[in-house]
Image: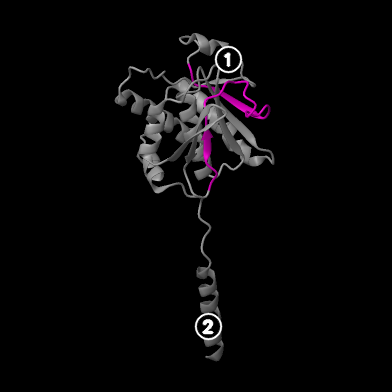
Amino acid sequence: MKKLFFLFTTLSVIAIVITSFKPITAPRIYPELEAYFKSVETKAFSKDRMDVLRNIQYNVEISGYDFEDWNLIFFCSENTFRSQASQVFAQTLCYERKHKKINVFSAGQTSGEIDPRLIAYLTKIGYRIAKSEKEEKTMYEVKFSDRADPIILFSKTISDQSLPSKDITSVVVCDTEKEPVCKELKTPSTPLSLVFPKVLTTDDAGKVEATLKSIAAEMLYVTQK
């Protein structure tokens, strides 16, 4: 009987010790952003589109098998809307899904001012954004978590010194057939084409939101594990 009591006591102590350890939780993004990404509807992609998405996903996934960082760069004609949105969504989701070796950037053949409609939308869905000026450039500090470094957004060309020069997956999000400037892009690696429609100044809020949700949906796909 004493042996049984001792065994029961020992097992009870072990159980208490085990349950006292808190599980390690994944890095958390702001709750509003978590809710936003959960609300984004996934859609059926065409075969050609799916092939590109799977290729990007493969590049993201294998980064975890190496000791070196890997760089994902989104290129566009002006680096003011589509490529910037792709960078923000991809970097947020790489952090949230623990793709620790992936660094995300964006650039354009030309540069300009980041579309204020993009900043307004990002603010609306839960990003915390601070605007600043540096060397006559408008910059935005975009926070998606208090546990992570913010994303520093500013419009830049493909030759900007802040961009990495090696270990790069290049993704072109403008249409080389319809946008003349896009044809001039000389990416540092053979590019993958993931075209999003160009958002015009005359487009209404519905078109802007639909485009951004489409970008978010595809970044959700390429960062999934």
The residue lying toward the viewer, choosing from 20 and 105, is 105
136 up-or-down from 223: above or below: above
Residue placed at 42% from the left, 22% from the top? 46
Q: Name the disc covering residue 185, or none.
A: 1
Residue 112, position as x, y percentages in the image? 49, 20
Q: Amino acid at mark 2?
A: Thr
What is the magenta segment's predominant secondary structure?
Answer: loop
Q: Tell me the mark number nearer the camera, choosing from 1 and 2.
A: 1
Residue 170, position as x, y percentages in the image? 59, 24
Image: magenta residue range: 148-174
The residue lying toward the viewer, choosing from 157 and 56, is 157
Answer with left or right where residue 105 lies relative to residue 204.
Answer: right
Q: How many marks?
A: 2
Residue placed at 62% from the left, 37% from the top? 63
Q: Name the disc covering residue 177, or none.
A: none
The figure's colour scheme reads: one colour
Residue placed at 47% from the left, 33% from the top? 219
Residue placed at 54% from the left, 78% from the top? 13
N-terminal-most mark, 1 or 2? 2
33 up-or-down from 86: above or below: below
Q: Name the disc covering residue 9, or none.
A: 2
Residue 193, position as x, y percentages in the image? 52, 19
**Residue 155 located within the stretch drawn in magenta:** yes
Q: Amino acid at mark 1?
A: Leu
Residue 115, position as x, y percentages in the image? 42, 25
Helix, strand, or loop for circle 2?
helix
**Residue 119 located within the stretch drawn in magenta:** no
The residue lying toward the viewer, choosing from 216 and 225, is 216
- The span from disc 1 to disc 2 (Cα, nearest Å) is 70 Å
Helix, strand, or loop for circle 1?
loop
Residue 99 in view, yes or no: yes
Residue 41 found in image quarter: top left
